[in-house]
Amino acid sequence: MESRSGRDVMVGVFVLAGLLATAYLSFSIGGLGGGPPGGFRLVVGFDEIGGLKVRAPVVIAGVRVGQVASIDLGDDYRARVLLDVGPTLELPVDTSASIMTAGILGDRYVSLQLGGEADLLAPDDEITFSESAVLLERVIGKLVHNASVEGEE
Amino acid sequence: MKAVAQLGRWAVGSVEQLGRLTVFAVAVLRAALTPPVRGRAFLAELYKLGVRSLIIIGVSGFAVGMVLGLQGYNTLVRFGATESLGAVVGLSLIRELGPVLTGLLATGRAGSATTAEIGAMVVTDQLDGLRMMSIEPVHLVVTPRALALVMVMPLLCAIFIVTGLWGGYLIGVGVMGVDGGSYLTSLESSVDFVDDVVGAGIKALVFGVLVGLISTYRGYTCVPTSAGVSDATTSTVVVASVSILVFDYFITALWGV
């Protein structure tokens, strides 16, 4: 009887370990349940989002403070990005958002630069200052174009 | 003419085998739904097939994660994109290597043992002994083993993936010096619950059904000699491994996971 109950405990531990691993994969890594408890959502319009994806990080001074909740096409045919950030943040109304890239080929993320106004953004407010993603192809295209124009002169 | 006849015989034989396997699967399913519930036997099988596979799964997962970390780093460093190491390790493990390697390892560790055990029972007429006591062998012997393999596979797969992620982290962050935060960030932002994690679970479940059915079927139908048991065990490993790889391709091709 002793060994049998010992075996049952081992089976219990095994099943629990498997379920914990599944939960870790689902919630922490898979992002089920929406990641950090936001409650504080902000809207930003961008002309070009490059390869920004849902659940990309939102950072201030390089520190992760939230994530991208959703990306849609707005009525004005600009990208409408919903940011989910921590509720304790106090962001001035002239805060600006820009889309950056980690490394040259890394993932896109949204970086917030704080402004200097005294008024603060409320939940669901729109960040009016935005800087679109820099598309590497476009930069290269411009460089090539400039070089060829200079060559002709 | 002879070759054509042989081809025909082979084709009829494979279809016949497939049919028998299907009939067997229905019998197992029916046995699983008929009372009494064989809780004790099921628990004993969970211990044998699950708990005792933990070490091989954990060690293999860790080693595979370490290799992925190293290979991924050495490839990504050429493009200056080592920040994406977490995504490379995570997506390869979750979408492909985790379910497939767990399936293959469990076939070797648990599937072959199941076939050999049931085969030995057939050789020593134990199944006939059960029938004499009007206990259906499929109900007492086969079903708990098949169900335990189906249940064990997703759990082992999840453990394999998590230890693999640790292994990749250890090599990438600890040894090669990738930033720990960017490893986790690229991992978390590239892995999606529905696309990747659920897909891995479905693959593991399908592989569990395959290994569970094939290993018990081979044991149950083995020729009652010692050579027969050895043939059945070999055939379980070969057939289950190949069908895991083939099914893996079709699951990926049809549902993109």
Image: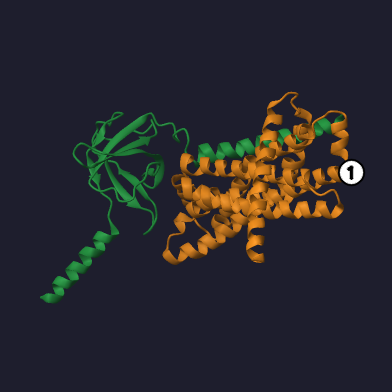
Chain colours: A green, B orange
Viewed as shown, does residue A150 lie left or right of B26?
left
Image quarter in which the N terminus of chain A is found: top right
Q: Position of residue B77 (x, y in %)?
A: 47, 64
Task: Name the one closer to the observer, B26 or A53.
Answer: B26
Say which residue appears at 44% left-offset and 35% top-offset: A36
Is residue B177 among what the camera can see?
A: yes
Is residue B90 among what the camera can see?
A: no
Q: Position of residue B11 (x, y in %)?
A: 63, 54
Q: Amino acid at mark 1?
A: Thr
Q: Position of residue B9 (x, y in %)?
A: 67, 56
Viewed as shown, does residue A85 lie left or right of B41?
left
Q: Which residue is mark 1?
A: B124
Where is B69 relative to B202, above or below? Answer: below
Residue positioned most to the left: A153
Viewed as shown, does residue B112 lie left or right of A82?
right
The quadrant holding residue A90 is top left
Say which residue appears at 52% left-offset and 38% top-offset: A26
Circle 1 — which element? loop
Task: Name the one closer to the observer, A19 or A107.
Answer: A19
Say which chain tag 1 marks: B
Say which residue appears at 18% left-offset and 39% top-offset: A76
Count of residue discs: 1
Q: Position of residue B194 (x, y in %)?
A: 47, 39
Image quarter in which the C terminus of chain A is found: bottom left
Disc 1 packing (10 Å; few <14; some 14–19; many ≥20): few
Residue positioned most to the front: B1
Task: Name the one closer to the observer, B149 or B8.
Answer: B8
